[in-house]
Image (cartoon, rainbow, N blue to C red):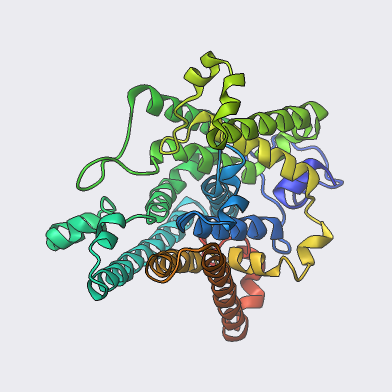
C-alpha cells in the first residue's frame, strides 16, 4: 500500500491491471469500501479538543494541541469537513451530474443551517436563564448576547443572516458558507483540480492583501474569515479527489518528514515563549517582528503550514489499516466523529454549562477535571445512542452505509 492509498483510503477503482487509456479523468475517487476510520478518529478528537478549549483554562487544557503548536482543532475540523464533503458529493457529481449533486449539497446546507438556528435559540435560552436565575448579568456580556437583550427583533434577523453569533458559535456559519461554495468547487475540480486549488490560494492571498472579510453584527467581522479558511476546506477537497495520490512521492520522501519534524519543533519552541518569556531572548527580533501576530481569523500561513506538517506525519505513520483503529479504547472518539454535527452542538451547550458550574460552584482543579471528563463522557454517550438508533431504526442503512459512511457534517451519514 502506498502513501497515496493511505491518504485517499484505498486504491483507485479499476486501476489495478487496467490498460492505459487515452485520457485520464481530471479527478479520481477511492473505491467504495469500508468506512475511513482515521477521518472519524481525528474529527472526534477535534470535537473533544474544541469542547475543552471552550471551557475556562484547566489542567486538561494542557492536553490540547494549541498549547504545543501554531494550529488547533479548528484546522483539523475544517480540513476533514472539506475532505468528506468532496468524497461524498464529488462521487455524486461524477455519477449523477452537477444538478443532482448541487441539489444534495443545498439540502445538506439547509440541514446544517436549521441546526445552527436551533443551537442559537437554545443557547440563548440557556444563557438568559442562568443570568436571570443567578442574577449575574456578566454571563450575557461574556457570552456576547447583550445586543440580543437590548434589541431582540433586530438581533434575531441578524442571527438568521449569520451576522450575529454568541461566543463559541462561529464554526457552523463558516461551514455553511463553505458548503454553499462546494458545487462551484467540485465543478471546477472536475475540470481542473490543480487550477482550482491554485485559485483558492490566489483568493487567500488577495484576502490578506486587500483585507477582504464578512462583517458581523453589531460591529466587527467574522471570527473565521471564509475568504481565508476556504483554503483549508478546498485543500481537503483536493486531497480527497486525487490530490493526495499525486503527492505520494512528496509525502513518502524523508526530506518531507524531516522538514515537518523541524517545523513542529520550531513551532513548539515558539509556544514555549508564550509561557516562559525568558526563552524569547533566544529568538531573533526580526523573526518575531515578521511572525507576530499569528492571526487565527484569517488563517495565518504559519497556522496553515503547521497543520500541513502535522498532516504529513500523520499520513506517514498512521496507515489506514492500523489495528488500533479497531481498538475499543478509540471507539468513543470514532463514534463522536461519526456524528459530528450533533456532537458539536452538544459540545457548545456543555461548554457553557461547565463554565457556569465552575463560576458558581467551584473553580478548583478537581472540578475542572470533573467537568471536562463529564462533558466528554456525555458526548460519547450521546454519540453511542445516536449510533444505536441509526443502526436499529434505519433498515436501509446496510445499503447506503458505504456510499455516505465518511460524511456526517458533509452528508449526514
Location of residue 99 by image quarter: bottom left
Q: Which x, y percent locates residue 179?
A: 44, 51
In the rendered view, does 201 fall on the left or right side of 320? Answer: left
Q: Which quadrant would the C terminus be assigned to in this image?
A: bottom right
Percent position of residue 91, x then y: 59, 54
How many numbered marks are there?
Answer: 0
Say if 405 sits above or below 289 in the image.
Answer: below
410 or 317: which is nearer to us? 317
Task: From the viewer's side, name the closer residue of 309 and 133.
Answer: 133
Q: Where does the image place residue 38, in percent across and percent down from the top left?
A: 70, 56
Residue 22 seen from this side: no
Q: Is residue 38 left or right of residue 17?
A: left
At horizontal 70% and vertical 63% (from top left) the residue drawn is: 35
In the image, residue 117 sits, relative to residue 396, either above or below, namely above
Give above or below for 294 relative to 81: above
Q: Can residue 40 be seen?
A: yes
Q: Position of residue 280 (x, y in %)?
A: 57, 25
In this view of the protein, which residue sits in the foreground, 103 or 217? 217
Residue 407 located left or right of residue 103: right
Given residues 128 and 187, the one toward you in this image is 128
Tell me which residue sits at (46%, 40%) in the image. Answer: 230
Q: Residue at x 33, y 67 (%)?
A: 123
236, above or below 46, in the image = above
Amino acid at each position: 500500500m502506498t502513501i497515496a492509498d493511505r491518504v485517499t483510503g484505498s486504491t483507485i477503482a479499476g486501476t489495478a491491471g487496467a490498460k492505459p487509456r487515452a485520457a485520464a479523468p481530471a479527478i479520481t475517487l477511492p473505491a467504495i469500501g469500508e468506512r475511513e476510520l482515521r477521518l472519524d478518529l481525528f474529527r472526534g478528537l477535534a470535537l473533544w479538543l474544541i469542547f475543552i478549549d471552550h471551557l475556562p483554562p484547566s489542567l486538561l487544557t494542557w492536553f490540547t494541541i494549541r498549547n504545543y503548536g501554531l494550529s488547533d482543532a479548528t484546522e483539523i475540523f475544517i480540513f476533514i469537513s472539506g475532505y468528506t464533503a468532496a468524497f461524498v458529493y464529488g462521487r455524486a457529481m461524477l455519477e449523477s451530474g452537477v444538478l443532482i449533486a448541487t441539489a444534495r449539497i443545498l439540502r445538506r446546507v439547509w440541514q446544517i443551517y436549521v441546526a445552527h438556528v436551533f443551537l442559537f435559540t437554545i443557547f440563548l435560552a440557556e444563557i438568559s436563564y442562568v443570568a436571570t436565575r443567578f442574577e449575574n448579568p456578566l454571563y450575557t456580556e461574556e457570552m456576547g448576547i447583550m445586543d440580543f437583550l437590548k434589541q431582540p427583533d433586530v438581533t434575531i434577523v441578524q442571527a438568521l443572516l449569520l451576522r450575529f453569533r454568541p461566543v463559541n458559535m462561529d464554526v457552523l456559519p463558516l461551514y455553511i458558507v463553505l458548503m454553499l461554495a462546494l458545487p462551484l468547487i467540485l465543478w471546477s475540480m472536475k475540470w481542473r483540480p490543480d487550477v482550482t486549488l491554485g485559485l483558492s490560494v490566489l483568493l487567500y492571498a488577495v484576502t490578506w492583501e486587500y483585507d477582504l472579510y464578512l462583517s458581523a453584527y453589531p460591529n466587527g467581522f467574522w471570527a473565521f474569515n471564509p475568504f481565508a479558511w476556504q483554503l483549508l476546506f478546498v485543500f481537503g477537497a483536493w486531497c480527497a479527489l486525487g490530490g493526495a495520490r499525486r503527492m505520494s512521492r512528496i509525502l513518502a520522501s524523508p526530506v518531507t518528514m524531516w522538514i515537518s519534524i523541524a517545523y513542529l519543533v520550531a513551532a513548539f519552541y515558539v509556544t514555549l515563549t508564550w509561557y516562559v518569556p525568558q526563552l524569547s531572548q533566544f529568538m531573533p527580533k526580526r523573526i518575531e517582528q515578521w511572525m507576530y501576530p499569528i492571526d487565527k481569523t484569517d488563517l495565518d500561513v504559519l497556522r496553515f503550514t503547521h497543520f500541513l506538517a502535522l498532516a504529513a506525519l500523520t499520513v506517514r505513520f498512521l496507515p489506514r489499516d492500523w489495528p488500533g483503529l479497531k481498538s475499543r479504547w478509540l471507539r468513543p472518539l470514532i463514534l463522536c466523529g461519526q456524528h459530528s454535527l450533533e456532537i458539536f452542538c452538544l459540545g457548545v451547550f456543555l461548554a457553557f454549562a461547565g463554565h457556569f458550574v465552575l463560576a458558581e460552584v467551584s473553580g478548583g482543579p478537581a472540578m475542572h477535571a470533573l467537568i471536562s471528563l463529564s462533558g466528554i463522557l456525555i458526548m460519547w454517550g450521546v454519540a453511542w445512542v445516536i449510533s444505536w438508533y441509526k443502526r436499529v431504526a434505519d433498515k436501509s442503512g446496510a445499503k447506503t452505509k458505504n456510499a455516505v459512511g465518511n460524511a456526517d457534517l458533509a452528508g449526514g451519514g
